[in-house]
Every structure is written in structure tokens, then in C-alpha cells.
Amino acid sequence: MLLIKRITIENFVCFNRLEIEPTTNPDMPLTVIRAENGSGKTTLLRAIRWGMYGERALPGNARNFSLHPADWQPDAQGIRTMVSILFETDGSSWQHLEGQSKRAAFELRRTVRTEKTAPGRSDRPDFRRIDETAYLQQQRADGSWKTHDGGADAVVEELLPWELRDFFVMDADEAADYVGGSENKTMDRHQVIDKTTYAVSALLGLDTFRKAEDRLKKISNEFGRNASRATGDRKLAERQAELDRSREELDRITARVQSNVETKTDVQDKLDRARGRLEKAVGNIHAHDQLKQRMADNRESLQKTQQRRRRALDELGAGIFDISLFGALASGEIQSVRERLQPLYDDGSIPVRHVEFVKSLLERGECVCGQPLDARSKFGRRVQESVSQSSSQKEKANWLSDVLDAANTLHSYRDGMAWRHACAEHETELGDLDNDLRELEAVKREIDFKLKQVDDQEVQVSRDEIAMLEKQLEGIQRNLGADDIEAGSLRKKVNKLEGTIRDQQVRAREANEHRRNKSIADLLVRILQGAYASIRGDQVAELDLQMNRLFRQMASNVTDDATAENDQGKATLAMIAKVGLRPLDGDDDKYEIFALNSRERSMPPTEINGASRRILALSFVLALCKASRTRAPLVADSLLNFMSGSVRTNTLRVTAETASQPILLLTGSDLESERDAELVARHAGASYTLTGQWQHESEGGDVLRMTQAGKVSLLCHCGPRAYCDVCERQGQSEKTGWTRRRDGVHRQ
């Protein structure tokens, strides 16, 4: 029936502004929105429901539920909340499965203003909501938009009726109402049956048959009554006079419409010519914007060139500290140092080279001539004294050697050529940059001149004329619309009067005609009843098979599933042998979901654990959409709660492969396993993460970076195994095995 293309939310509880674009790729239909508990999943679901259905979609006492941002303090100025849903439809609906028109795009936009008020009682809020308005726009073939004639709420009710909201915007706990309620909620059986029956009848189209049957019965009864009343004649003169007056009024309106059509043609021609003059003045309709873009590019080039010139000047100024300049300026002193120290280097005085050799002889205890060098020998003691004296002078000698090395290095720069060459390069670069700046300034003056011409001359006159003509054309269109409505009403009146007068002439035959029509209506009722019984049996049987098949797929390879603490002692998936849908005993028009164990004993929902109830409800929702060929989004919050292991993976896979446009709000723990991550990579065409900034670690949470102050939830494009500066949490990389990079790319 429809696909959601974009959801935009402004100033709704913890969302300052949020924009989500679910995937519409049929090969990758899954959209994943990951969020830890308390980060805004349920709020997002409520925002979508409010956008679709308005105030009645809010939980509890809607009057006390605050839509406005948590940090906003009520004031007289107020704050505007808005939810926009852009969607595409093929013209079909839950009542008309085959599309009646071509594919079209719509935007549903709902707004409301919240302002401060003085509560009359302590239990009343200090705010009130006013001016809630829903708009529905439809996109024309040329890409423009028009207000849809049907009205927003009426169209939503036709496409996604309120009673079937759990099929399209699903809270997992609410969806469990189809199987008796969630773990903390118990429902009467008749409530469950009524809810299930409505969904089956509506989506399979069975209620359409019932309505048609009731309508035919009423028509048949009316024919019977008319046959009894069809006696006597009436005066024709009054009717004929009224007909003549109506025809004259219709002629006047028709003439006025023709005049307006001619005026519209003239105005449209003037508008086309004014647009032509505008194009001629500017060159083309985009020339003004192109000039502005050229100016922006020129401004950017000027800034870059000026930055390069500043760098070149800095580098030229830094040349005063260059070693080559110092070598040229101090060449005389450097030569004097070399002349003093080079002889000392040549005779081995600097650096001291013999000390280490003599030390090695002392360590060995014998001179190269064979004399002993131990501490007891006289010769050895003399050598030791010499080494001690030489070591004390080694540091000075080595320092003089370093001075000689530095002097030799500086000596190579004595002519100053390297410094002059570097300066020349910087001077050349500065000259080139100055030329570039002069050219850019000239271009800037040229663009300024053209922009001034465009702004101050014929363009503004043409634009004013176009605005005036467009306004005039809009007024003519309104008048034509009003005249068309009035003319239509008069035509109906004329036709009715003509029919009344004509009927007067055949009144004698009317009673017999009514009796024949009643017989035909009675026959149609019987035909419709037979078709209804046949279709009901076939479609319910198909739904029953589809439901059991999907349930078995989600429960496959499960030997036992984990059970929550409050579900201890309740039946698990492994204990359920068959599920399906069956008519109620004694009333074939009502239905209920059933589950059987291996002994074919019925298992009431109160005997089944929470995860199994969710899977049972989900198998019903998916099977009913499939059997009824309902193509619609499935926005589901906390769908995988209480599930683990293969149960969770199977449920995720079946939902992604069966639903037309699944949009799943999940936690990180729902997607921990490699299998879940692979499923998302295979089926998800879009992935997002919601992060509650109030969960920053400074507030006792585990979000590492405070990217926006306040009680807001931010959206990023991270998938189930990725994270960024917005959504990074403590221990995330260790938990998932993924790492974070500066460029935002995430790799395992």
C-alpha cells in the first residue's frame, strides 16, 4: 500500500530535530534504529503515531502527556512541535488492494503549539496544546505539491486505519494483545477475539463483503417500500418553473467560467513572456545564482592565495636565522678557528684517541712489548697515572673536536650562495602570488559589477511582475474552483428536477419496476453470501498455514529458550507444536489465535512465556499482511525483547525477509552476535543509532562524549557494530570487537 521515505521530527520530547530516511530498496528492505534502553526508541514510536493519528495516539491521559522538549520551560510564546511523514503509495488501501491510481508521493505534516497556562487544579499540567493541524500534500507529475482534497485524517484512516495501528506502528507489548496480552497485562478472551477478528476481517476484505451485503439488503427493502408508495400524480408546473430558473443560473455561471478561463489564458501568456524577459536579462534562469557561486569561489581563492603569501613572507623572514647566512657573515672568524684547530686534529691531540687503547692494555695486564702492566709493577703504575691524567683532558679535547667539525660545516657556506638562492625562490613566489592576487581582485570587481547589474536592472522588475501575475493567476484559479463547485451543484439540481418531471410521465409503471428491482437485489444478496463464505474459508485457511509456517521458521533449531524470572514455569517455544488461526465455535465470523502442544492440547496464552507470545503475535501479523497482500511499513519497538540465541536470530531474519518495509527499533544487545550482525549487513539498506546525551558518563551513564547539552537524543548513521563521537559508549569496542577511526570508518 505505501512506503515511508522520510520521517522528520521537531521539538518532540527528547528530539530537537530528527530526520530518518528508511530504505525503500526491495532487495535490502530492513531499516535498523539502534538505541539503548532509555535513549528514545519508545518516544520515536510515539512521535510517528502522533504524526499519523494525532492526540488520540498519546499514552494515558493525553492532555497531561507533554510533547514539548524536556528542557523547555512553559512560556507565553510557546513552542511548535512538528512531525512530517513523507510516503509513497500505489493507490491501493486496506479496503482496495488493487491500486486505483498511479504511484504518488504524499507528505503528512502534523503540527501543534504548546504554551504556558495556569492550571486550575494541582493535578493539571502548567501547559496546554493549541492549534493542532494536520496537512496532507500530494506531489504532482511535474514535481510541485498541492493540498490533497481528501483531508489528512481521512486519507490516513483509509491507508492505515487506527484500529490496525499495531500492524504498522507496533509496540511489542501492544502487539501481544492478539494473543492475550503481554506478561504484565491480562485481557478478557472476548476482547482478544474482537481485536483479532477486526484485523482479519479488515485486512482480508471480509468486512467489505459484509458491508456490501448489508447495503444490498437495505436497497432491497427500499425498493419494497417504494413499490408500495408509487401511487398518484403531482403538479408539473411548479417543478418546471424551478427547472427553468436553475437552468438560467447555470447558464450565467457557465458564462462566468468561460470569461475566467479566457482571462486565465491571457494572464498565463503574460506570465510566460515575463519569465522570458527574466531569462534574457540574466542569461538563463540560474545565471544570478551562478554569479553568486563564482563570487564565493573567488572569495575562497583570495583567502587561500593570501594565506600562501603570508607563509612565503614568513619563510623569507625566517632566512635571517639560516645557517648559510651565518656561514657567510662569520667566514673570517670561522677560518681562524679552522687554522688553529686543524693541526691539533692532524697530530691526534683532538679528539683523544689513545686513552681507550691504553685502557684495554691495562685491562689485559700486558703491554704490546711484553712488559707486565699489573698494579704491582712499576711500569704498570706509571701507565695508570698517565691514563688518569689523559682522561681528565679528554672532555676538553673532544669538545674542541666538535668545534672544528662545526667550523668545517659553516665553512662550506662561506660564499652565501645557498642563502641568496633560497631568498630568490621566495621572492619569485611572492611575485607570482602578487600577480594572482591582482587577477583575483580584477575578477572580483568584474563579478561585483555583473551582480550589481543583475540586481538593480531589469531582473528585479521582471521578478516583481512575475510575482504579481502569479498571484493574479492564483486568484483566478480559486474563482474557477468555486464556480465549478456551484455549477456542479446546479447541474445535480437540474438533473434531479428533469428526472422528477420525467418520472411523472411513467408513474404508472413505477410499482412494477420497484418489485423487479427488489427481486434482483435479493438475488445479489444470495450470490454475495455464497462468495463471502467461499473466500472466507480459502483466505482464513491460507492465513492459518502461513502463520504456522512463519512461527516454525522463527522457532527452528530451538531446543529450549531462555525464560525471564517472571516466566518461570511457563511453556517455552520448544513445547509448542502448532499454531494458527481458527473460527470461534458457533460463530464462523469471529476468530482467535491458538497454540497446541505435542499432544494437540490447546495452550492458553497465560501458559506461554513472554518471548513465545511475541513470536506468536508476530507470526500472526506477518502472515496476515502476506495473505492479504498488504504492503505497508512495520515500525516495531522492542520486538526482540526477552529473546536470545537462535530465537532472536530467526525472528530477525524472518521479519526482514517477510515484511514489506520493516523498521526495527532495537538495543545493542539485540544485535550482539555475529549472526545478527551478518543478517543486518545482508538485509539492512539503512542503519541509525539514537543516543541519549543525558546518559553521558558525567551524569552516571556510559556515553563517552557530550556532543550536545540537554536532555536530547541525537541520531547518527552508525550500524549495529559501529560507533562514532556521538554514540560511543564505555567498553563498546571490547564488547563488539570493532574499533573506531578518525575518519568515521569502522573495521573489525
Image (tube, grey):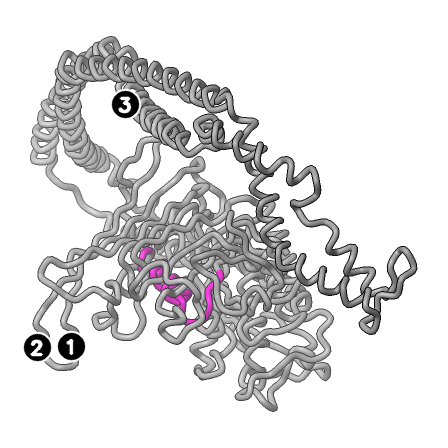
Q: Relative to residue 461, is residue 693 depicted above or below?
A: below
| Magenta stretch holds residue 226 | no
Dot label at residue 124: 1
Q: Nearer the viewer, residue 469 or 21?
A: 21
Label 3 crowd bin: few (<14), some (14–19), many (20+), radius 10 Å: some
Q: Which residue is mark 3?
A: 292
Q: Which residue is mark 2?
A: 120
Residue bounds of the magenta highlight: 34-51
Q: Residue at x 16, y 56 (%)?
A: 131
Q: Quadrant of the C terminus?
A: bottom right
Q: Nearer the viewer, residue 729 or 280?
A: 729
Judge left or right: residue 73 versus residue 216: left
Callout 1 amino acid = Arg
| Badge 3 or badge 1: first in the primary sequence | 1
Q: Tell me if residue 364 can be seen.
A: yes
Residue 431: image quadrant is top left
Q: Residue at x 46, y 51 (%)?
A: 524
Task: Assign the magenta stretch its main secondary structure.
Answer: helix
Q: Nearer the viewer, residue 260 or 244?
A: 260
Judge left or right: residue 534 versus residue 634: right
Q: Relative to residue 333, is residue 539 depicted above or below?
A: below
Q: Nearer the viewer, residue 49 or 521?
A: 49
Q: Relative to residue 508, is residue 39 depicted above or below?
A: below
Image location (x, y in percent) of residue 428: 41, 16
Label 1 crowd bin: few (<14), some (14–19), many (20+), radius 10 Å: few
